[in-house]
Amino acid sequence: MERLNHSRVPEFVLLGLTDSPELQIFFFVAFSVFYLMTMLGNCLILFTVLSTSHLHSPMFFLLSNLSLIDICLSSFATPKMIMDFFAHHKTISFEGCISQIFLLHLFTGTEIVLLISMSFDRYIAICKPLYYSTIMSQKVCVGLVVTSWTVGFLHTMSQLVFILYLPFCGPNVIDSFFCDLPLVLQLACIDTYVLGVFMVSTSGVIALISLLLLFISYIVVLVTIRGHSSIGSSKALSTCTSHFIVVLMFFGPCILIYVWPFTNFLMDKILSVFYTIFTPFLNPLIYTLRNQEVRTAVKKKISNQYFSFGKINPHYTVKGLERSRE
């Protein structure tokens, strides 16, 4: 172990998205706005669900946890990428690189199980509505969230248990804006092709199987919806459509990256940007725009804050204005 520590590189060099100064300025502004909007959107959903009593249901409990994961997923690498746009030497320590891999697979593994839990919730609500309150109890919902984080932790540890003992003596250049398992494995000083294909492809196969299971569950739900009333069918279809869009946006890039690993094409960077930045940004927009209950609750919270501000500050009330004139 001591020999491996002496031969290990102290840091990795991140090439980032581009070398063009003009594009770096553009990306800095664009991704800063995306990151800020992602934080605001997901925090708004969390605040709205937690502070609105009629949203204390299993579906919105799981939705709030999805927003929490999206906050984490967009924060493990995006802030450093934004700061690195103006850095002459884009480097990350070995420990920092391993931490990024750990957090990436923790959050993605957790989100996979949580999305499956959300589809299970919609299946019970539509296909077995009479048993919904019994099956989706508070204890079950908490158990699903705890299971999601547990599976995510076990998944990421299974990825790191081998890579921690690999020797990294050089080269140390990573053609991306963050550390990911396929790219780091290529830098080991020993032949890791078989190990890499097994570890990385396993993640891709898990994502692919999960997507197929989700796809089958949505087909069952859609078939069941056909026998419901038009109003109920419309509401259920809107909710399922929102879920399925989120599922495709999250699973699509993951499958393309991990089913066919060890490629250094520009498409890999674009896909990485999509599921680490764009997907967490779009999730609150999709749920807010397509879900009437969330949209109404958000508007009510904003209006309440506006009117409460007028009541708290007497200068902005009618009586306050009359007194100021006197």
Image (tube, grey):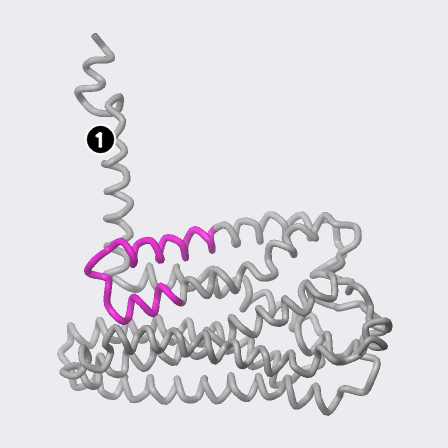
82 falls in the magenta region = no
Position of residue 21 measured from the top left corner of the image (x, y, whole percent): 74, 49
* Residue appearing at x 63%, y 67% in the figure: 100
* Residue appearing at x 38%, y 73% in the figure: 145
63 falls in the magenta region = yes
Residue range corresponding to the magenta coloring:
37-65
* Residue appearing at x 43%, y 79% in the figure: 113
Q: Locate the C terminus by quadrant.
A: top left
Question: Please, which residue is most extreme toward the top here?
Answer: 326
Q: Name the residue under label 1.
A: 311
* Other-residue count near label 1 (Cα within 10 Å), few / some / many at <14 / 14–19 / ≥20: few
The secondary structure that dominates the magenta segment is helix
Position of residue 82 measured from the top left corner of the image (x, y, whole percent): 64, 52
Name the secondary structure under disc 1. helix
Badge 1 amino acid: Lys
* Residue appearing at x 38%, y 76% in the figure: 244
Position of residue 33 measured from the top left corner of the image (x, y, whole percent): 53, 49
Left or right position of 87 against 269: right
Q: Is residue 104 above or below residue 309?
A: below
Q: In this view, does 203 lie above or below 7?
A: below
Q: Which of 249 and 164 is in front in this view?
A: 164
The quarter of the displayed image where residue 75 is located: bottom right
Position of residue 192 measured from the top left corner of the image (x, y, whole percent): 76, 86
Q: Locate the N terminus by quadrant.
A: bottom right
Q: Which of 145 and 30 is in front in this view?
A: 145
Left or right position of 47 against 3: left
Q: Nearer the viewer, residue 138 or 14?
A: 138
